[in-house]
């Protein structure tokens, strides 16, 4: 999948988790619980295809640990980005209803994460939900802050990037400032990557390609950040705003490690999410 040789999608956990989330919502809806998530992981998702906090929680699940301990026991990754990448589907299924999206994102995230790790998924779910009911990424980001605890480090980072947008017109200088301020975090931590996603969305000026590319070019967890930025920009752009040179080479198919979903049609997955919404 290098430039000029894209012929279909590549499998990635940032694709697998929205697919698995769709499966969970079709079966459990608003009654979704961490136990439901754990059962789906062990039934449908190979352990070697999940990483960091998810793998640590997975091991705890198969060892028979109580569900409420799976996020904490032997899990040094529990505030990393793994939960944040799982929030998209809740935003898709609850368009314009960020409170509902964030509540179910909490149920999903709490299996493997704590603190800012959970807040990251709640934020991404709420943000994507807000995109359906706002006219710009800036409006959606501001609205999403209501679903992040105000005194958390994640809230501080998101507010700081919003304030920076009013002071710094240059994307290059903005990204340098983000990297300087939050570069002490691990490269796959929730907080620094959420700041990059926010910057990419704001300085992307509601253009799909610019938003995704600037987010990815910011570095750190590029596939995770690009996926979230794509959800934000894609919703705001609508189907007619998705550039053909990016969409057409996928041939309406996605690879997946989730059992029963490999080579699914993207349009079919979208229709199923829409039916739930």
Image (cartoon, rainbow, N blue to C red):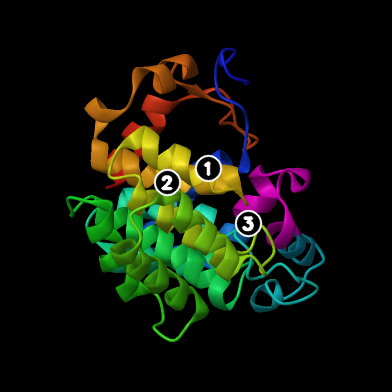
Residue 39 lies, in percent from the top left, at 63, 56
Q: Which tag, 2 or 3, sits closer to the chain's start?
A: 3
Q: Which residue is mark 3?
A: 39
Q: Residues within 10 Å of mark 1 (few under 14, many from 20)?
A: many
Q: Secondary structure at mark 2?
A: helix
Residue at (30%, 75%) from the top-left corner?
Answer: 146
Q: Secondary structure at mark 3?
A: helix
Q: Which tag, 1 or 2, sits closer to the chain's start?
A: 1
Q: Quadrant of residue 69?
A: bottom right
Residue at (65%, 52%) from the top-left corner?
Answer: 41
Q: Residue 229 bears which disc, if any?
A: 2
Residue 83 lies, in percent from the top left, at 56, 60
Residue at (41%, 81%) from the top-left corner?
Answer: 149
* Residue interval drawn in magenta: 40-55
Q: Residues within 10 Å of mark 3 (few under 14, many from 20)?
A: few
- Taking the view exactly as shown, the residue that stands out farthest to the bottom is 151
């Amino acid at each position: 999948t290098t430039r000029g040789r894209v012929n279909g999608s590549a499998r990635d956990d940032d694709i697998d988790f929205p697919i698995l989330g769709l499966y969970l919502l079709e079966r459990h809806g608003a009654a979704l619980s961490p136990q439901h998530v754990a059962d789906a992981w062990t039934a449908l998702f190979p352990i070697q295809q999940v990483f960091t906090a998810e793998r640590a929680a997975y091991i705890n699940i198969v060892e028979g640990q109580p569900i409420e301990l799976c996020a904490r026991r032997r899990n040094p990754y529990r505030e990393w980005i793994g939960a944040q990448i799982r929030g998209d589907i809740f935003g898709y299924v609850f368009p314009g209803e960020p409170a509902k999206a964030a509540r179910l994102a909490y149920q999903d995230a709490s299996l493997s994460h704590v603190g800012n790790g959970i807040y990251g998924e709640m934020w991404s779910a709420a943000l994507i939900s807000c995109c359906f009911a706002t006219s710009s990424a800036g409006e959606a980001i501001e609205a999403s802050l209501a679903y992040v605890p105000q005194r958390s480090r994640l809230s501080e980072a998101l507010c700081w990037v919003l304030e920076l947008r009013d002071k710094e017109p240059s994307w290059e200088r903005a990204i340098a400032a983000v990297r300087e301020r939050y570069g002490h975090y691990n490269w796959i931590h929730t907080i620094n990557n959420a700041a990059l996603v926010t910057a990419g969305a704001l300085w992307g000026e509601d253009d799909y390609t610019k938003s995704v590319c600037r987010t990815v070019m910011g570095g750190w967890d590029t596939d995770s950040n690009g996926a979230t930025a794509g959800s934000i920009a894609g919703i705001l752009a609508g189907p007619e705003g998705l550039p053909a040179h990016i969409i057409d080479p996928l041939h309406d198919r996605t690879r997946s490690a989730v059992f029963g979903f490999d080579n699914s049609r993207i349009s079919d997955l979208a229709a199923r999410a829409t039916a739930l919404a």
